[in-house]
Image (tube, helix red, strand yellow):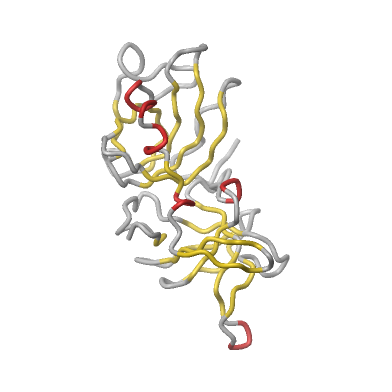
Amino acid sequence: MSTTCPAGNPSTVRPWVTAQRMFCVNRSTISVPVFLGVPFGVVGPGGCTTQIGTIQPNDYFRWQDEGRRVTGSPEEHQVLIRNAGGQLQWGFIGSSQVDVNKHAIFSAIWNFQRTNFTWNGMNLREYAIWNRPAALRSRSGGLIETLPAGTRIGVGPTLGDAVMGQDWCTFWRVATVVRSPGGVVQWTWANMNPNEHAFVDVGLPNNRPTTSSIRTSLA
């Protein structure tokens, strides 16, 4: 399968894993080592010990999936990060320390909106584009437009609405964008032609609150 992801395809989804595709931030106080994993591999001591990078507190990253090798074993989590060389790379984390801090480490960006608003009967969460323009693509991958810094965007009312792209791995699903059709500033469907959601480039590996392409309540 081909992909538009700069890091290539993630490892094959194993039958015991749960797919996530979530845009996350590490809100714990620990630095999380990320290892070069292999499909059906074991990460950490006694398994794959090649470390490719670290998820520091407040780092943004993509959480791809999770699973347990056998019942009662530590979870392994596949993530997309900026590696030690500054490039996007898929890797794995998994340890008892991580599992204990799991909720804080895998905090969804969806929870850090700047404000809430109601549009088309939906209670949406508002963020903004900042630091750089961001490409906006349709669900089939076609470029809709490039949103300038300062553009306000809205994400759906449930966590399941806030997934990242299947093939466009650094893109985040958004429902609505502030535009000025006919000179009137208003919320519009992210993809105005079929009136549906679209996907915006979050700028990974610009992966901290002050350098991300997505402004949240964290910065």
Image quadrant where residue 1 sits: top right
Q: Residue at x 50, y 15 (%)?
A: 69
Residue 47 at x, y percent in the picture: 36, 14
Residue 93 at x, y percent in the picture: 38, 27
Residue 49 at x, y percent in the picture: 30, 19
Labels in figure, total: 0
Please state if 3 lies on the left or on the right of 53 as rendered: right
Q: Residue at x 52, y 53 (%)?
A: 172
Residue 189 at x, y percent in the picture: 64, 68
Q: Residue furthest bottom?
A: 183
Please state if 8 lies on the left or on the right of 197 as rendered: left
- Relative to 59, is 198 above or below? below
Image quadrant where residue 82 sits: top left
In which quadrant is the C terminus drawn? bottom left
Comparing 209 with 47, the one in front is: 209
Q: Residue at x 51, y 32 (%)?
A: 65
Comparing 156 with 16, the one in front is: 156
Image quadrant where residue 149 sits: bottom left
Comparing 98 with 163, the one in front is: 98
Please state if 79 lies on the left or on the right of 143 as rendered: left
Q: Residue at x 57, y 44 (%)?
A: 167
Q: Residue furthest right?
A: 194
